[in-house]
Image: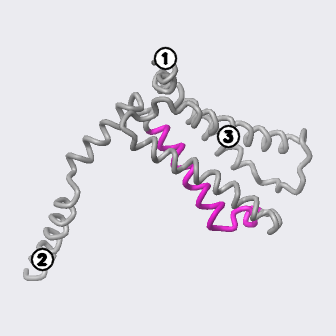
Amino acid sequence: MKNIINKSMFLGFFYNYLFLKININYIVFILNIMIANFGGFTYFISFLIILSLLGYYSYRFLFTNFLTNLGFKSEINTLGKMFGSYNLSLFIVGIIILFKNNGPNGMWSYFLIISLASFLICAINLLSNLGIIKRYGIPEYWRSVIASGLIFILSIYISLFGIYDSLYYSFIN
């Protein structure tokens, strides 16, 4: 019995410590503002998918030998780190957009850069797998990159469809 009381006291202390520091109502309030800025839950989730993919690939390119693990030569890791730093900058700007007061208002160039880069990467990988473009040492098993590129492009265009009026708001006013 004494052991159960000690565990419940510890859990009560842990619960009070967490929720005295972080107010759940405030977090829900901020999330509601974010969802309203993005025009609904679906578009907010699609933007979070974009951010999670940017964060994942920037981490993989910067801090692991991602391209070497896929079968490329080790000399290409420098190019991978440059691509990772590009993704990291887009990830940081996406976090800023997420926590901005007015959300994605006027941020059309951010979505344009991401959608063009994703479309070109997916198209080049698709054309090289079809044999139209010379492979230059690209391994055969890169089908998952095409699938993730298509998911990336799909989530970008879902997000763009939902927030297109707020993206171009700066041109109207």
Q: Which residue is mark 2?
A: 4
Residue type of the residue flagged with mark 3: Ser
Q: CA distance from mark 1 to mark 3?
A: 28 Å
State which mark lies toward you, 3 or 2: 3
Where are the magenta residues, as a range? 45-70
Q: Which residue is mark 3?
A: 118
What's the mark number on residue 15?
A: none
Residue 146 image point, x, y percent? 71, 44
Residue type of the residue flagged with mark 1: Ile
Q: Residue at x 64, y 37 (%)?
A: 113
Q: Quadrant of residue 42?
A: top left
Among the two numbered marks 3 and 2 on one chain, the one whose residue lies closer to the N terminus: 2
Q: CA distance from mark 1 to mark 2?
A: 63 Å
Q: Which residue is mark 1?
A: 172
**Secondary structure beneath disc 3?**
helix
| Residues packed near mark 2 inside 10 Å, few (<14), some (14 to 19) or many (20 plus) | few
Among the two numbered marks 1 and 2 on one chain, the one whose residue lies closer to the N terminus: 2
Q: Nearer the viewer, residue 41 or 120?
A: 120
* 14 relative position to 122: left or right: left
Residue 14 image point, x, y percent? 19, 69
Q: Nearer the viewer, residue 46 or 2?
A: 46
* 100 relative position to 76: left or right: left
Among the two numbered marks 1 and 3 on one chain, the one whose residue lies closer to the N terminus: 3
